[in-house]
Image: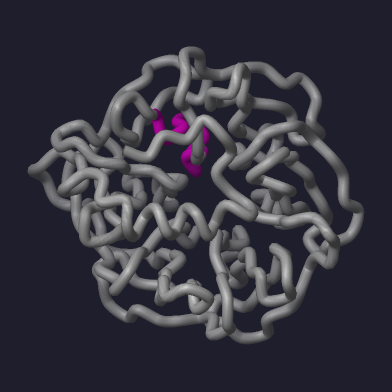
Amino acid sequence: MIHRSIPASGAALTCLLLLAAVSGCGSEPAGKSGGSLVSKEGRIAFTRATSFEGADLESEIYTINVDGSEETRLTDSPGLDGFPAWSPDGERIIFTTDRDGNWELYVMDADGSNKRRLTNTPEDETSPAFSPASGKIVFVTNGFEDPRIRVMDADGTNRKHLAAGNWPTWSPDGERICFTIYPGGFEQLAVMNADGTEQRPLTDGRGNSEAAWSPDGGKIAFMSANEDEDIYVMNADGTGRKRLTDDVPGNDHWPPTWSPESDRIAFTSDSPQGSSIYVMNSNGSGLTKLTDGPVADVFPAWRP
């Protein structure tokens, strides 16, 4: 079992990918059977770990259609590329890379061309997300030891601190951000205004993290951990919590991502053979395995 009472991003990407590949937690992904996917339209970006051989640890960014066709590799650089996120128009992908010696943010066109660096600081920057209007980017610095949520203009300028926390996700109107906090060393979800004001808890208990706001604004999907990690969904105000992946013990996590119509969810699920991306309907039915990489496929992001 992977239990994380500390932030899980930033310099921890190496640890996360290694855990995904070799932990052997779970058997088959948890999920409800029956039903079919509403549509096979759409494209998902994800991180594929291509090697775990000592210093040759590598990962790259890929995209794939939701029906499993047209898998395409977008990056090809020594080291680790990960945490892809789409621009609202679906024309660009922002991602994290250590190709320059520490974790920095890059952006590229949706076909992998025109890669350009956005940050150049001694801090490690991860978990980026474009605002719905594409004018801002929220991201995390120093995610493993002291996670801080920051925001900057889409060109990398005008950088500002918002809150202590991790795994930020925008509301579809761009007015609020849901994120992970760590009261008492345990993960919980909180929400704040886009400028960092009016921060308040959204969940109680422990082990709630990695939120994703639905495009229609009504729901938030997230990971919750008891003995195992599963995908849950709740109303945007924190009520109506429902477990979606509950049939088989396992670990389903690493921020879920919604289809543009808010009717499907993609997520990472671990097995003894590695980690793969799965897709299901928003009620937990219609579970479908999307990827089957040689080592680990993680961090899915659905194209708007």
Q: Position of residue 140 (x, y in %)?
A: 70, 47
- The residue sitting at the left extreme is 34
Q: Residue at x 32, y 43 (%)?
A: 252
**Residue beneath the point at 31% across and 38% down:** 1
The question of residue 218 being in magenta is answered with yes
- Residue visible at 74% across and 32% down? 164
Magenta span of residues:
213-224
Q: Which residue occupies the foreground of this view, 190 or 56?
A: 56
Q: Position of residue 223 (x, y in %)?
A: 41, 35
Establish if 70 lies above or below 20: below
**Residue reaching furthest to the front:** 54
268 versus 187 height, above or below = below
- Judge whether residue 172 can be spotted in this image: no
293 horizontally vs 56: left or right: left
Horizontal relation, residue 65 to residue 140: left or right: left
Query: Vertical placement of 241 versus 127: above or below?
Result: above
Whole-percent x and y of residue 80?
56, 71
Q: Is residue 243 visible?
A: yes
Task: Tell me how the rendering is colored.
Answer: one colour
Number of marks in the rendered image:
0
Q: Which is more toward the observer, 117 or 216?
A: 117
Question: Residue 25 magenta-drawn?
Answer: no
Q: Quadrant of residue 128?
A: bottom right
User: x and y percent of residue 170 in the render?
Assistant: 62, 41
The residue lying at 52 percent from left, 34 percent from top is 217
In the displayed structure, does residue 53 sit left or right of residue 154? Answer: left
